[in-house]
Image (cartoon, grey):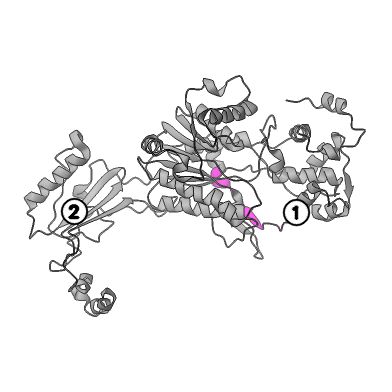
Amino acid sequence: MRLLRFPVALIRPSLGHSYALSGLPSTATRHCFNYLGRARLGLRDDLQLRPAAVAYQGVRGRDNHRVNQFKLTGRLLEEQLILDLNFNARMSSPAQMQAFAQGLRHALLGADAQPAGIYLSSSSSSGALWNIPAQALPATTGFATDTPVNAPGTILLTGATGFIGVHILRELLEQSCATVHCLVRAPSQADAQQRLTEVWAHFFGHSQPLSAIERVRVIVGDMRQPRLGLAQIDWDHLASTVDAVYHFAADTRLVGSRVEMQRSIVAPAYELIRFVEAGKSKVLHFMSTLAVGGCYRGKLAARFDEDALDVGQDFLNEYERSKFLTEGIVRELAYRGHSAFIYRSGNVTGHSQTALFQRNADANRWVQCVNAIAHAGMVPVNYNEPLVLSPVDTVARGIVALSLDSSLPSGTYHVESPFSISPGLFVDALQKLGIPVARTVAGSLKEALERSGKTALAPVALGLFWASREPRNIIYDHSRTLSRLSAHGVEFTELSHDWVLRFVKRLSDLGLFRQAQPAAFNASVQRKEYSRT
């Protein structure tokens, strides 16, 4: 019935769009409520739209069919809740509505309610969604382009037991005074506490045990479960007390089905955003990856800066696709008026000084390539393609510094080293550790691994898989973020030959190259020349 009436409204527009509603049942609801959220659009609020502080003469005809007798619209402007109530003056007097408005103010604010701030107009503002009369605005409102984010007092951190996550935890403790609630997947509270304690001790030693840090709270949860695996009472409590959420939990496997990846990456993001929107207002900090840029199959390379997301790329695996989709979800959150930050990094590597790397080092793509070279014993003569590695401590320090910068607008930031290193240095390190690697005339690592005749070995086969991957054809631009980091005193440094030796030595200590080492390998000489740090 409604669809049949629309053409009539279009033919006689002078009667207003509600003319098409004439003849509908008179049982329409008496009240209508709208909530428009914050007066900002997008992740970075680039358009910087602000409500017009003018009074319209009315955007509805007096004789238009009202449908609803009361229409209450609310929106947030610089943390001020502005309420717009349209009513039928033939049924309610101005004095009655003044009293109602003051009663509503008292119900919302209690003892803090003030009698001022109510503006009554004889014209209808229904439909003027971006109009707030100047008389209704607080005197101090200046239409700032971005509302500063206060330092968080309470933080929820996911992924604290991960390689990057535990470094984020340490930086949050050092750079802020916040209490950090760490969501840890475990069978029990004791197991969760033990799991985080062991990870902390592995990377930071026992000089400052985690148990002695009062600002760390361990919570048993599961990102894959409804309510993050929390009881309703715990969910409600955290939702009403947490100021900022740092989401660093993720399935970092680079190989997996679409169903698996979306179940472990995309679905938890929806539940976490539901938490962000519950209770008090919260800021979301989300760890993504530069791999969302995928690979670009055009003739010219695509530029991928902090504002870019969809540049027409294809994805090399489902991990990249799932991270791409999750970034879209976070952007949708920003369009609903929330503060949201996305951080992208590429190949995050060992500590800038000690080279200490993740405990499951063999799960890292570049480490798998180094392992393949060690087992194949062969590499191209000119193996100098640029390799970018970003030390985890610098990445974590940079992310936390940005996240605590109250002047920083919501948006995406590339926390990535601007320096590249030659992969040939890793080959040199293998040779110095006594692992024979011959240099052969080959156009690529893929060709060299195939010539080795050892592709049946699992490490070599895995390295061949990565070496066969098509080039990304992407030019990354981190300039804006690097400038911000520099202002905070966070600078990436070039990795040295000694750092590479230390890094590869750690991999050797983990037993990654055991099958590649010759019988004459002198372990005692190795221990003497390259001491463990």
**What's the distance in space between the residues labelled 2 and 1, CA to CA?**
63 Å
Classify residue 391 as left or right of residue 523: left
Q: Of the residues shown, which amino acid type is indicated by label 2?
A: Leu
Classify residue 509 as left or right of residue 333: right
What is the secondary structure assignment of the residue under circle 1?
helix
Answer yes or no: do the residues labelled 2 and 1 have beta carbons within 8 Å?
Answer: no
Examine the structure image and report whether residue 469 is included in the region drawn in magenta.
Answer: yes
Classify residue 107 as left or right of residue 482: left
Tell me the quarter of the image containing the N terminus: bottom left
Examine the structure image and report whether residue 364 is included in the region drawn in magenta.
Answer: no
Classify residue 350 as left or right of residue 71: right
Over which residues does the magenta segment extend?
A: 468-481
Nearest the eye: 246 or 31 = 31
For label 1, the residue is 465
Image quadrant in which you'd find residue 511: top right
How far from the left and from the top, in percent, is residue 179? 45, 29
Residue 85's mark?
2
Image quadrant in which you'd find residue 168: top right
Image quadrant in which you'd find residue 388: top right
How far from the left and from the top, in percent, is residue 332? 43, 53
Q: Is residue 45 visible?
A: no
Q: Of the residues shown, which amino acid type is indicated by label 1?
A: Phe
Q: Could you classify mark 2 by the number of other residues whose Cα lies within 10 Å: few (under 14), some (14-19), or many (20 or more)?
A: some
What is the secondary structure assignment of the residue under circle 2?
strand
Q: Hey, which residue is sitting farthest front in the picture?
A: 187
